Image (cartoon, rainbow, N blue to C red):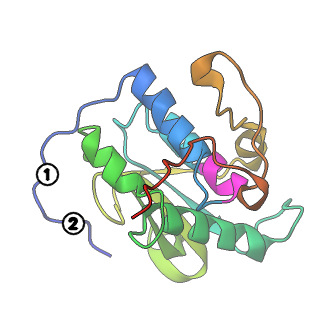
Amino acid sequence: MAPSTTRLAKSRPLSDRQIEALKIYIAGSKDASNFGKRLCFWLIDQSNNLTRPVCVSIPKNCPGTPKGQIELCEQLLNSIHDMISGGNTTHLNSLLTVASTTFRFSVHGGIYDEQGELNNFHGYTAWLSPHLYDDKATRLRLDLEKINAIRLADASYFGGSHDLPEPKESVSWVKKRKQPKV
């Protein structure tokens, strides 16, 4: 797919505090698996505070995945898709707009082959870039060891740190406001 030809305003890098707040927001999402959240953290880190467009392809035949290759690919697709979709609760790309960056998360079926072409089979690719499905983004090599070692610390901003349970077991750390009775 060709990159977007829409002219975008120059993106400014996010501060370390903004990156930390973004990660806290992602960690609290009910729309993604812990692997999907860790993958987003890793992409953010690899993008140098959202200044370098990056992407990573995850093939369905990825070796070393304990729960199976297809499940890993589905977690990538579903987690990023569900965090950027308007039909869910996270609205991750809207938050990036508010932060005054043109970078966005995107995901698409297919992986980059040895010739640098995105084929529509065998896995999924995730991007963090100002351009949708950016062919010029730096292609990262999947590093499951580093991604799985990332701690989802929702309390680091407040001085603590611990891994979060999977979303279906967690209670949102953002308290919902009580609605007045009508």
Quarter holding the C terminus? bottom left
Residue 61 appears in the picture as rendered: no
Above or below: residue 28 compared with residue 118:
above
What percent of the width, then of the height, locates residue 149?
Answer: 77, 38
Image position of 15 (left or right of 101): right
Magenta region's main secondary structure?
Answer: helix
- Tag 2–tag 1 contact (CB < 8 Å): yes
Q: Residue furthest top?
A: 159
Q: Which mark is residue 4?
A: 2
Name the element at disc 1. Answer: loop
Disc 1: which residue = 8
State the residue at coordinates (37%, 22%): 15
Residue 96: say if magenta.
no
Can you tell which quarter of the image residue 123 is in?
bottom right
Above or below: residue 35 compared with residue 108:
above
State the residue at coordinates (73%, 67%): 72
What percent of the width, then of the height, locates residue 40?
Answer: 55, 48
Magenta region: 33-39
